[in-house]
Image (cartoon, rainbow, N blue to C red):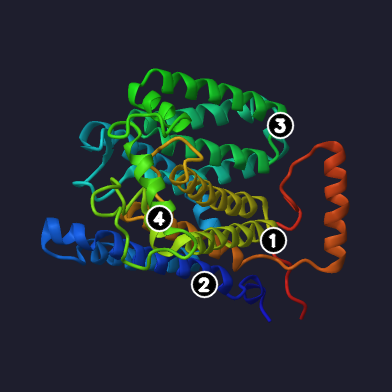
């Protein structure tokens, strides 16, 4: 048996099944939420469904391609990938299309660079952090250049009036920094500075302040103004009850919930499929998180671990924010639900990210009993010495050659 054949394992079919289930639910809900809108605007009830189906095909091809490509390839090209992303983020500020109060789209709304940046940033930061090793704990080698890079990226996204995406990118990057072994005190200080920056951005924006006010007291806010959307969403969720009104039977999708097929699709799902449907979707995302972190722990090197963790954190954070907004647990913000909300850029990037996660899973190294014992001893020593949090970093970076 060759060493190459030992490197590759079977596709993580359980993860693929969870991805397929979420994608199918998404297509089903998009058709249900948009058939009236499609007929009203284009005289085609399936207009939005067909567009999402086409994007799903592109996303599936992207996922297959990313699964087949050896994931260290992205480590070698992380710098040009990041440079291209910065060019797109700059370009959208000058030639982007303005919609919904933000200048975030290129090519007549077909591509949203901030969505593409989510995966590019994860790849670059994983490559950068894995190259630092123990130096990441040093302020000059770790936090300072990391903060400058993150500030540049999130700043460009904030200039597009897309604070929610900037927050998601920042949270994912900080989670990766922690997993890579960043100094906990430095992370806490960075969190405080990030919180202060967020407070400044919110207090300098009237519509953001209005959203915070309606979140703090949704029932007392103007029912036809700032509190309208969250009220209608809560009505949809409450109407669904335990089992829902039935697929296609939502009443709130008929113009009551703005963007019911994008940011508010979880509310339509709750209205039609009830609490049971909502719990199924949440369980699928929880299972996706479990498989993602399991892949990260089994990755053969630090880059694989940080990369898999970053992809998993990014998707799960996004799902948490969307569901939190719809359930009035978080202030209202425009974040799509991965694999379910309507939107080409978000869907393709999500599926490509999951393909990259599957690529890491195909090259994981099953540990022997002796190696597991060494890992436990190293982990205990790491806890005592407060060393890197990446398991097996630098130890089993390459597969062992097969015995002949």
Q: Does residue 170 show up?
A: yes
Q: Report the residue marked by disc 4.
A: 239
Left or right of 86? Residue 302 is: right
Q: Report the residue marked by disc 2.
A: 17
322 and 390: which one is in front?
A: 322
Q: Which is nearer the N-term, disc 2 or disc 3?
A: 2
Q: Residue at x 69, y 61 (%)?
A: 298
The spot of residue 212 in percent (x, y) is: 43, 28
* Quadrant housing the N terminus: bottom right
Q: Residue at x 24, y 62 (%)?
A: 51
Q: Which is nearer the N-term, disc 2 or disc 4?
A: 2
Q: Report the residue marked by disc 1.
A: 298
- Badge 3: how crowded within 10 Å, few (<14), some, or many (20+)? some
The spot of residue 354 in percent (x, y) is: 49, 60
Q: Which numbered disc covers residue 183?
A: 3
Q: Residue furthest left?
A: 43
Q: Which is nearer the N-term, disc 4 or disc 1?
A: 4
The spot of residue 195 in percent (x, y) is: 54, 25
400 and 173: which one is in front?
A: 173
């Amino acid at each position: 048996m060759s060493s190459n054949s030992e490197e590759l394992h079977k596709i993580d079919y359980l993860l693929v099944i969870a991805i397929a289930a979420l994608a199918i639910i998404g297509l089903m809900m998009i058709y249900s939420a948009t058939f009236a809108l499609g007929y009203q605007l284009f005289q085609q009830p399936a207009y939005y469904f067909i567009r999402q189906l086409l994007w799903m095909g592109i996303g599936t091809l992207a996922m297959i391609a990313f699964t087949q490509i050896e994931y260290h390839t992205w480590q070698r090209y992380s710098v040009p990938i990041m440079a291209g992303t910065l060019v797109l983020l700059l370009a959208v500020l000058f030639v982007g299309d303005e919609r919904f109060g933000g200048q975030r789209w290129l090519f007549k709304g077909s591509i949203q660079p901030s969505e593409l940046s989510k995966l590019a940033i994860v790849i670059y930061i994983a490559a950068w952090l894995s190259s630092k090793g123990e130096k990441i704990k040093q302020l000059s080698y770790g936090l300072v250049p990391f903060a400058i890079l993150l500030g540049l990226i999130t700043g460009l996204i904030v200039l597009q009036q897309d604070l929610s995406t900037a927050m998601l990118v920042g949270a994912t990057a900080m989670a990766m920094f922690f997993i890579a072994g960043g100094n906990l005190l430095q992370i806490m200080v960075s969190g405080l500075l990030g919180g202060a920056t967020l407070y400044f951005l919110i207090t300098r924006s009237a519509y953001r302040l209005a959203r915070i006010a309606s979140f703090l007291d949704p029932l007392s806010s103007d029912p036809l103004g700032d509190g309208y959307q969250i009220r209608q969403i809560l009505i949809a969720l409450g109407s669904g009850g335990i089992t829902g009104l039935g697929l296609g039977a939502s009443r709130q999708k008929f113009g009551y919930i703005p963007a019911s097929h994008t940011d508010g699709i979880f509310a339509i799902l709750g209205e039609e499929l009830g609490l049971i449907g909502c719990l199924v979707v949440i369980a699928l995302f929880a299972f996706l998180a479990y498989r993602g972190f399991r892949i990260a722990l089994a990755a053969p090197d630090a880059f694989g671990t940080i990369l898999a963790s970053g992809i998993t954190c990014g998707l799960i954070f996004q799902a948490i924010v969307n569901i939190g907004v719809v359930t009035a647990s978080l202030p209202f913000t425009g974040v799509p639900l991965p694999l379910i909300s309507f939107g080409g850029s978000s869907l393709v990037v999500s599926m490509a990210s999951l393909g990259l996660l599957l690529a890491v899973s195909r090259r994981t190294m099953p540990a022997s009993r002796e190696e597991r014992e060494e890992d436990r001893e190293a982990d205990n020593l790491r806890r005592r010495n407060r060393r890197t949090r990446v398991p097996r970093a630098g130890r089993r970076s390459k597969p062992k050659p097969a015995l002949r």
